[in-house]
Structure formats: structure tokens, C-alpha cells
Image (cartoon, rainbow, N blue to C red):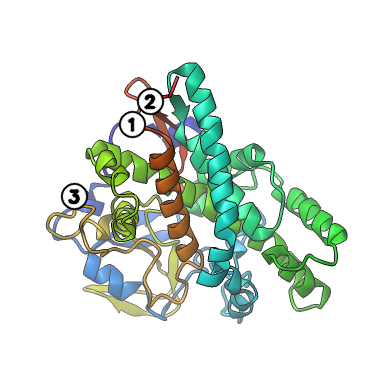
């Protein structure tokens, strides 16, 4: 992993893209930028962003396909693995195959398992804290293993969480337009897939991987989609939800709100607003994936030729109104974090991610007294495809 992609986080409220000041320049709705792929349009204003995301003239098949690109580019709820000629893809079929595991009833059925996992991690942190004055790494001792463990329960695979976290962090440290095959994940995913397929008993069949196995056996799913489906669930959990948990606790501490929230853990409305405000201000996915104009179009005051790459930046659109730089947990939810409800590619796991964040919040504040950022510790973050955390040192008051 390139060290140039790693930054030390001094302030969770700070903008994460200081090298491109036009992202946050008042009164700027969009701007052009020259790249190796030609001129690209960056949409940064809130109103224009909300108008741009659902435009049918934009597709997520943005860059030319290449054997050097990571297989997650064929994600079932992102890009279709077709060429740029407009060949119909399989997006709708894949969504129909896996959607039910991300809907409210399914997530609620999994919450007991998620809760038990959180309790085990908290117990381990408390035991560790008794030996070292309450110090622990929120990213690696809780947020990462919790998010990846929840993903494993969702999929139905037993994961070696530390190994997979290393793989994922290498992936997300690369720019979106230049993600190489830095390791071979295909073989490992196929190994886990095969083990599940041959070991299934009569009582199995209720998890996402079972639906994938059955679809492959019945010729309803091309086997080339197995890796993207599994990989992108893991990516979404580890590098997005895990990092959002870290940002949420960091923002609460930074603004002196941790004790207020801890005293009101039975107030579900407040917890919901904490999660939403954290997503607005600290969401770790800065933008949409790169979009491509399939025909000549107009975005705001800009004429956009066919094949132009377009980016829509959540990170700036969410701070485009008065008082948007203030972290306010009483604010009515009003942001673009997981795209918009009008976007045909809205994040399939958005509901699950929110439930996981809320559960993590209650477990951490309820189980670790006087939780706060360690003033003698460090926070290190990857800046790339996703802004995931490599380290986030926190401290609590141990009982002994």
C-alpha cells in the first residue's frame, strides 16, 4: 500500500480532500478537470448533485474494461460487466437475486447475531483495557471485525477477518480509475464458495451464499458473478460501514457530545439522528463512482459531450448550505450519503449499514465508560476509492 495514500487525521470534522479546494468553494456548482481520460466534470453543489445523480443519460460503466481492473468493477449493484457499446447487462437480475437479504425483515432476523458479535468484541476490548489503561484501536479491535463479521453472517461464509481486512485496505487505497489486481482474491472466494457448496446440510439454504449457489447450479447466474457479489458485500462492510462507525465516534468526541448520547441510549430518535448526521458530515465515500454520459447532455450550465466522465461529490454537496459545517445531532436528516432515493443504483445495503451503526453506537457507549479519543494515540486514514481507517486509537475508563 502506498504510504502517500495514508493521512494522519487530526480532526474528524475537517474536509478530507484539501488538495482540491474547488470542491468546497462557495457558489461553485461544478467545474471541469483535465485527466488522462480527458476532461471530467465534477458536480459539487447540493441542488445540482440531487438533479444529476438520477439522470438516465449517465451510466456507471465509466471507464474502458481491462483485465488489469479489479473484479469488483462488475458489482451487481454497480457496473454491469459488459462493454461500453451499450450491451444490456444483468443488473436487475442480480438485484432480484440478493435484495431480500438487505430488506428490513432479513436485517432484523440477523440482529441477534450482530449483537452477540458486538458483545464478544466489547468483552475483548474491556479485557485488553484492564491491562493497558483502557487503550484500544477502535478501527481494528471493534469497527473492522464487527462490520466484516456481520458481512460474513449475511453472506454465510466463515471469514478470517484480519486477512480480509488487509486485502480490502490494499484495494481501497488505489484511485478508482486505477485499481490493479494487487493480489488474487478470486481463488480464495471460490475456495470459500466451494466449501459452502459441498458442506451444506439439509437445514442450510437461508443465507445469501445459498441463493448464489442455487442460482449457479440452476444456470440462472453466470459463475463469473460469484466473485463480484461476495467481494462487494465485504468491501461495503469493511471499508464503508466500519469507517463510518469510526467517524461517528470521532465526531461525537470532537464535539463533546459523547456523554449526552450515552445518557440517552434509549432514545431511538436521537440515535437515528446521530447516525444520519455522522453520515452527512463524516461519510467516508466522498462521491458517486465515476459516471459516463451515454449521449450529449446538459448539466446545470455545462454542455457535456457524450462519453464525458462525471463525478458527483457527496462530501461537498452535504456542506453546501448555511451551518452545514456544524455537527448538529438535533438536525433533521438531510443529506446525500448513500446516493438518493431517485437513483436507480441506490445503495442496496444502506438500511443494513444504518442498523449496524446504531447497534455499534449503543454497544460502545453502553459498554465502555468514558469512551473518548486517546489524546496520546493516532488516527490514520486511507484516502483513495474509500476513506477507510487503518488505525483509530481510543481510550475508556477500565473497571480495574
The structure residue drawn at horizontal position 24% and vertical position 65%, both measured from the top left corner, is 46
Q: Residues within 10 Å of mark 3 (few under 14, many from 20)?
A: some
Q: Position of residue 263 (x, y in %)?
A: 28, 44
Quadrant assignment for the C terminus: top left
Q: Nearer the viewer, mark 3 or mark 1?
A: 1
Structural distance between the alpha carbons of marks 3 and 2 = 31 Å
Q: Check if mark 2's residue and mark 1's residue have beta carbons within 8 Å.
A: yes
Q: Is residue 171 left or right of residue 207?
A: left
Q: CA distance from mark 2 to mark 1?
A: 6 Å
Nearest to N terminus: mark 2 or mark 1? 1
Left or right: where does residue 41 sit relative to residue 188?
left
Estimate the x, y position of residue 170 in percent, counting from the top left: 57, 41
Q: Give whichever of 349, 27 is nearer the camera.
A: 349
Q: Nearer the viewer, residue 299 or 121?
A: 121
Label number found at residue 397: 2
Residue 45 visible (yes or no): yes
Quadrant in the picture for residue 47: bottom left
Q: Which mark is residue 370?
A: 1
**Depicted 138 relative to depicted 57: above or below:** above
Q: Is residue 115 above or below residue 126?
A: below
User: Secondary structure under badge 2?
Assistant: loop
Q: CA distance from mark 3 to mark 1?
A: 26 Å
Amino acid at each position: 500500500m502506498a504510504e502517500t495514500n495514508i493521512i494522519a487525521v487530526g480532526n474528524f470534522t475537517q474536509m478530507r480532500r484539501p488538495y482540491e479546494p474547488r470542491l468546497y468553494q462557495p457558489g461553485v456548482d461544478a467545474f471541469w478537470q483535465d485527466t488522462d481520460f480527458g476532461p471530467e466534470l465534477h458536480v459539487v453543489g447540493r441542488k445540482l448533485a440531487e438533479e444529476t445523480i438520477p439522470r438516465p443519460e449517465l451510466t456507471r460503466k465509466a471507464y474502458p474494461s481491462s483485465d488489469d481492473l479489479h473484479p469488483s468493477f462488475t458489482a451487481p449493484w454497480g457496473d454491469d460487466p459488459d462493454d461500453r457499446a451499450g450491451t444490456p447487462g444483468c443488473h436487475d437480475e442480480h438485484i432480484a437475486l440478493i435484495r431480500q437479504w438487505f430488506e428490513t425483515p432479513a436485517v432484523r432476523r440477523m440482529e441477534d447475531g450482530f449483537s452477540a458479535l458486538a458483545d464478544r468484541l466489547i468483552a475483548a476490548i474491556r479485557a485488553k483495557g484492564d491491562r493497558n489503561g483502557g487503550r484500544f484501536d477502535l478501527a481494528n479491535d471493534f469497527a473492522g471485525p464487527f462490520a466484516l463479521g456481520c458481512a460474513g453472517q449475511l453472506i454465510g461464509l466463515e471469514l478470517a477477518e484480519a486477512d480480509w481486512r488487509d486485502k480490502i485496505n490494499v484495494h481501497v487505497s488505489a484511485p478508482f480509475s486505477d485499481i490493479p489486481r494487487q493480489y488474487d482474491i478470486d481463488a480464495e472466494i471460490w475456495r470459500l464458495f466451494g466449501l459452502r457448496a459441498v458442506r451444506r446440510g439439509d437445514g442450510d439454504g437461508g443465507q445469501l451464499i445459498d441463493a448464489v449457489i442455487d442460482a449457479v447450479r440452476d444456470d440462472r447466474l453466470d459463475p463469473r458473478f460469484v466473485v463480484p457479489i461476495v467481494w462487494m458485500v465485504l468491501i461495503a462492510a469493511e471499508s464503508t460501514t466500519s469507517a463510518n462507525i469510526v467517524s461517528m465516534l470521532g465526531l461525537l468526541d470532537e464535539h463533546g457530545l459523547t456523554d449526552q448520547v450515552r445518557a440517552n441510549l434509549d432514545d431511538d430518535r436521537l440515535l437515528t439522528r446521530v447516525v444520519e448526521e455522522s453520515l452527512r458530515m463524516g461519510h467516508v465515500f466522498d462521491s458517486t463512482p465515476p459516471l459516463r454520459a451515454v449521449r450529449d447532455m446538459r448539466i446545470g450550465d455545462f454542455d457535456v459531450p457524450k462519453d464525458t466522465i462525471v463525478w458527483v461529490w457527496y462530501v461537498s454537496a452535504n456542506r453546501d448550505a448555511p451551518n452545514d459545517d456544524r455537527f448538529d445531532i438535533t438536525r433533521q436528516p438531510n443529506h446525500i450519503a448513500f446516493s438518493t432515493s431517485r437513483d436507480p443504483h441506490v445503495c442496496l445495503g444502506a438500511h443494513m449499514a444504518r442498523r449496524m451503526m446504531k447497534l455499534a453506537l449503543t454497544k460502545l457507549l453502553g459498554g465502555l465508560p468514558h469512551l473518548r479519543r486517546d489524546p496520546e494515540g493516532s488516527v490514520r486514514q486511507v484516502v483513495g476509492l474509500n476513506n477507510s481507517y487503518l488505525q483509530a486509537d481510543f481510550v475508556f475508563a477500565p473497571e480495574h
